[in-house]
Amino acid sequence: MFLLLFIGFLAAGSIHALKTGPRTKQRFAELMLVYSLVAPAVCWSIFFLGATYVHLADYAARGRGITFSLFLHVFSSHGLMAIALIALLVTYMPALRANRSGDGLD
């Protein structure tokens, strides 16, 4: 699954590089790097959110009550990592755009 997402992100990066801005080797390499770093962050976020769901669903299926303490334990060990990755991505993208506009690459 990761390989398919990675190839998809690289294809999207290639299209982005060809459709916008100057077509330089440096810009193409930068976009490939950015798009390739997004693929693992998205995959890990999906993995950690899925792990949170599966652990909680497993407790519920076994007839155990899902207490707030249990939810907090599972969320802090899995779900929090997914939210942190997504927050870092959301924070990084505007900074990348601002940096690029200052360099005159847009």
Image (cartoon, rainbow, N blue to C red):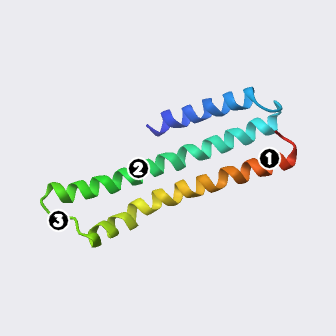
Mark 3 or 1, nearer chain start: 3
Report whether 103 appears left or right of 7.
right
* Amino acid type for the residue under numbered disc 2: Phe
Eyeballing the image, is 54 above or below 81? Answer: above
In this view, the residue in front, 57 or 28, is 57
Query: Given contact means CB atoms under 8 Å apart, are the residues at marks 1 and 2 in contact?
Result: no
Q: Residue at x 79, y 51 (%)?
A: 99
Separation of disc 3 and disc 1 at Cα?
Answer: 51 Å
Indicate the quadrant where residue 72 lies: bottom left
Q: Residues within 10 Å of mark 3 (few under 14, many from 20)?
A: few
- Look at the numbered disc 3 and give the secondary structure of its residue: loop
- Look at the numbered disc 1 and give the secondary structure of its residue: helix
* Amino acid type for the residue under numbered disc 1: Arg
Q: In which quadrant is the N terminus drawn?
A: top left
Mark 1 or 2, nearer chain start: 2
Q: Position of residue 36 (x, y in %)?
A: 61, 42
Q: Position of residue 74 (x, y in %)?
A: 33, 65
Q: Which residue is mark 3?
A: 65
Mark in the foreground, 1 or 2: 1
* Amino acid type for the residue under numbered disc 3: Gly
Q: Residue at x 20, y 60 (%)?
A: 59
Q: Which residue is mark 1?
A: 100
Query: Given contact means CB atoms under 8 Å apart, are the residues at marks 3 and 2 in contact?
Result: no
Q: Residue at x 80, y 47 (%)?
A: 100
Separation of disc 1 and disc 2 at Cα?
Answer: 31 Å
Q: Which residue is mark 2?
A: 47
Mark in the foreground, 3 or 2: 3
Eyeballing the image, is 56 above or below 9? Answer: below
Q: In which quadrant is the C terminus drawn?
A: top right
* Extreme residue toward the bottom, this view: 69
Separation of disc 3 and disc 2 at Cα?
Answer: 24 Å
* Extreme residue toward the left, this view: 63
